[in-house]
Image (spheres, helix red, strand yellow):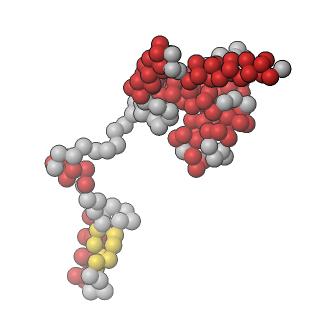
Amino acid sequence: MGKAAHQEFSDIIKGAPQGRLAIENERMVPVTDFDFDEIDSRLGFESPEKPVEFADMTAAFSLILGWMCKSHNKGSITHAGWKAQSLLWLLDPDRSRFESLSQIAEEAGVTKQAVSKALVELRDECGFLISAGKSQTARESYQKAQFAAVDAGCHSSDTRAKRKAEAISLEAVAD
């Protein structure tokens, strides 16, 4: 290596962060990091990653733990278990050992509707959008429709009750 090449190599080494050299066109050159964040900010784009305060994370975690541990059956620790499993399945199904909410409900000995209702309660309590159950607007709309059907006397429960009464009266006539 000639004296000029040695000097160039030495200058590169001195100016480059340790271990940050590359070969370009058969010459050693320092590696520099391109400041993509600076370009994005100049173009009006915000950085997608915003730091979250630790207090905010613990508040969210506390809210979720509170939801998991809240039980209508005093002292039922299994309640927290199926809630945790259902939330894991919803947020990251690949990490869950269950294939569906129905499987979780079956193993826990509760209905799928109870599992779904618990997830909807969490969604409503936290105010975030997770794909669990119907939206609040849809639920209100369905509830109004059910009340209107009851008032009109055409609700499905009325129909079932009428069929049952007719079946009982037909059995009585047959006897």
**Towards the viewer: 62 or 77:** 77
Spot occupied by residue 153 in the image (x, y as percentages of width and height): 51, 16
Rendered position, 163 above or below 106: above
For residue 175, side relative to residue 87 (left or right): right
Spot occupied by residue 111 in the image (x, y as percentages of width and height): 66, 30
Rendered position, 99 above or below 165: below
For residue 162, side relative to residue 41 (left or right): right
Residue located at (28% from left, 72% from top):
29
Picture mark count: 0
For residue 104, side relative to residue 116 (left or right): right
Residue 64: quadrant of the picture:
top right
Rendered position, 11 above or below 35: below
Residue located at (34% from left, 39% from top):
50
Residue placed furthest toward the bottom: 2
**Towards the viewer: 162 or 98:** 162
**Towards the viewer: 162 or 170:** 170
Q: Is residue 136 visible?
A: no
State which quarter of the image contains the C terminus.
Answer: top right
For residue 151, side relative to residue 158 (left or right): left
Residue placed furthest toward the right: 175
State which quarter of the image contains the N terminus.
Answer: bottom left
Q: Is residue 43 visible?
A: yes
Spot occupied by residue 168 in the image (x, y as percentages of width and height): 74, 19
**Towards the viewer: 160 or 73:** 160
Spot occupied by residue 160 in the image (x, y as percentages of width and height): 63, 23
Residue located at (73% from left, 17% from top):
169
